Amino acid sequence: MPPAIETRSLKKVYPAPSGRRRGRAGPLMTPGGSSAPTVPSGAKEIVALDGLDLEVPTGEFFGLLGPNGAGKTTTIGVLTTRVRPTSGSAAVAGIDVSANPVGVKQRIGVVPQQPNPDRQLTVIQNLLFHAAYFGIPRAVSLPRASALLEELGLADRGESKVDHLSGGQQQRLMIARALIHEPEILFLDEPTVGLDPQARLALWEVLRSLHAQGRTIIMTTHYMDEADRLCDRLAIVDHGKLLALDTPTGLKAKAPGGTLIEMTMDGPAARALALVESLPGLSRAGARENELTVYADRAGEALPAILRAAEQAGRSPVDIRLTPPSLETLFVSLTGRKLD
């Protein structure tokens, strides 16, 4: 059996927006609605994916973790045939996405970042219309749609218009729509963005249930706890590159030793870094603009010394945050920035 997902040296380059004044910069929006990497001054192109290699076995709950503009949505776009790769290869269920996009679409279900149902139709009509798109006769699609609404807690909303659903209910409708043609692989792009905590937890339970049924699920997210609790394996991506790939437990074990101390200064932190680096008990230290980041085995003992060093450098802390070893500390150590 081929892998559910396989990419080799996958690259996607977007042309820089035309009409931009020389020396200015701004974000480019990808087809999925997320911001691509910022356009530097004088740039002629934006590299959204830069030689991405991934392999996901059948039945795995796989997560792509990274900030906006990291390349997650572009990756999903390529794998769901909405975005043509510039070079490299990508296959879904053993089918090349460029050579046979129709064959890929028959085997996948897609839940977009923002719910996009037909708001003129009722909930069940949305499902029946989508099933008809795949050539499923009504005699088959109607009981299948009813069963999906029951499974996803929408059995009493079948005749409701979409605008009468909550945000969480609309997202569950999107999942039902993605499953109506019984795909092998389910793609979810930032499925819980904009949901309140209760709706978010409810959707987690839905996804766990779908995975327990044997479905392959590919999900993008920038929520650390979501990736940690749901996924079998995680790929951390940034600037279109794969930075780390492992189980959540394996990734956390690779986090730099000690507690991450993040200190926002009232000015550039580089002056304080020169003094902090000489302190004992620190495994790593860095500075970026006004942010000082330090990894300390014993944060309680290290913090007073760090504050004294900052004061000697003529800097005062504006904010101090302590984070134990986690996916977040690993991400900061790999990218030099926080996920959000």
Image (cartoon, rainbow, N blue to C red):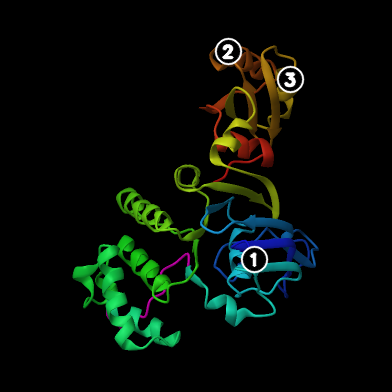
Instruction: Give whichever of discs 1 and 3 has the lower sequence position.
Output: 1
Predominant SS along the magenta part: loop
Q: Name the residue under label 1.
A: 28
Label 1, secondary structure: give it.
Answer: loop
For disc 2, the neighbor class at 10 Å (few under 14, some 14 to 19, many from 20) is few
Of residues 228 and 45, the one nearer the viewer is 228
- What residue sits 39% from the left and 82% below the top? 131
**Mark 1: amino acid:** Leu
* Residue 132 is inside the magenta segment: no
Q: Name the residue under label 3.
A: 277
Residue numbers of the magenta segment: 112-122
Is mark 1 in CB contact (under 8 Å) with mark 2? no
- What residue sits 21% from the left and 78% below the top? 159
Label 3, secondary structure: give it.
Answer: loop
Asked if residue 175 lies left or right of residue 59, the reply is left
For disc 1, the neighbor class at 10 Å (few under 14, some 14 to 19, many from 20) is some
Asked if residue 50 lies left or right of residue 199, the reply is right
Quarter of the image with the N terminus is bottom right
Residue 30 x, y percent position in the rendering: 61, 68
Label 2, secondary structure: give it.
Answer: helix
Instruction: Give whichever of discs 1 and 2 has the lower sequence position.
Output: 1
Residue 78 x, y percent position in the rendering: 64, 69
Q: Name the residue under label 2.
A: 304
Q: Distance between the residues labelled 2 and 3?
A: 14 Å
Residue 17 x, y percent position in the rendering: 70, 72
Is mark 2 in CB contact (under 8 Å) with mark 3? no
Of residues 296 and 91, the one nearer the viewer is 91
